[in-house]
Image (spheres, grey):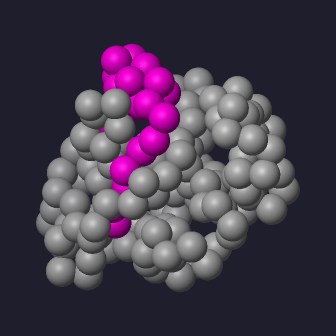
Amino acid sequence: MPGGLRRCRRSPSRSGSSTNSWHPTDSKEQKVTTWTADELNRIGAADELQIASTRPDGSLRSYVTIWAVRVGSDVYVRSAYGSDNPWYRRALASGAGRIKAGGVERDVGFAIASDPEIQQDIDNAYHAKYDRYGARIVGSVVGEHSHEVTVRLLPHEGSTSRWPLEPISSER
């Protein structure tokens, strides 16, 4: 997998136990946290989410407005029209960034949501939230073609600087 985007699957930590935290290879610690109920509700109710990935120097790129859905205690975004979308390629390359939605602003990590069992739930969430915009536009973010470009947003503590990361767990 190129760049910093990681697959969502369980991997052992350095101590051998499974964990949901970033494991930087330098001295900075960026710890994956959980969304609060308030954050989940506010992001879930927001029509749009602004997302920015980090540049190699650690600064944030410009925000891009996209759709996001909440499924359980997780937040997901998808790249409309596939993997060539610039925000998606930049997220793939950096693995980290910042989001703003519903008054929530958080540093996040980006992880590919590779679990096929959650994809239909994500499709359903997109339909429930966005079908009012019409089948053509919602069709750009639902269905099998969208499953491979589904990104789970992992809230974390720490800076948005580019992280040299090891793969992490994002399954529960």
Q: Quadrant of the N terminus?
A: bottom right
Residue 102 left/right relative to 41: left
Relative to 70, is 64 above or below? below
Q: Residue 154: give x, y in percent of width and height.
A: 42, 46
Q: Residue at x 34, y 66 (%)?
A: 53
Q: Residue at x 63, y 29 (%)?
A: 129
Q: Residue 61: give x, y in percent of width and height.
A: 27, 70
Residue 83 left/right relative to 105: right
Residue 59 left/right relative to 87: left
Relative to 52, is 116 above or below? above
Give the magenta-colored segment's residue range: 31-53
Q: In which quarter of the image is residue 150?
A: bottom right
Residue 111 left/right relative to 109: right
In this orientation, does residue 155 appear?
yes
Q: State yes or no: residue 43 in magenta.
A: yes
User: Along the line of sight, which residue is nearer the eye, 123 or 96?
Assistant: 123
Q: State yes or no: residue 122 in magenta.
A: no
Residue extending farthest to the right is: 144
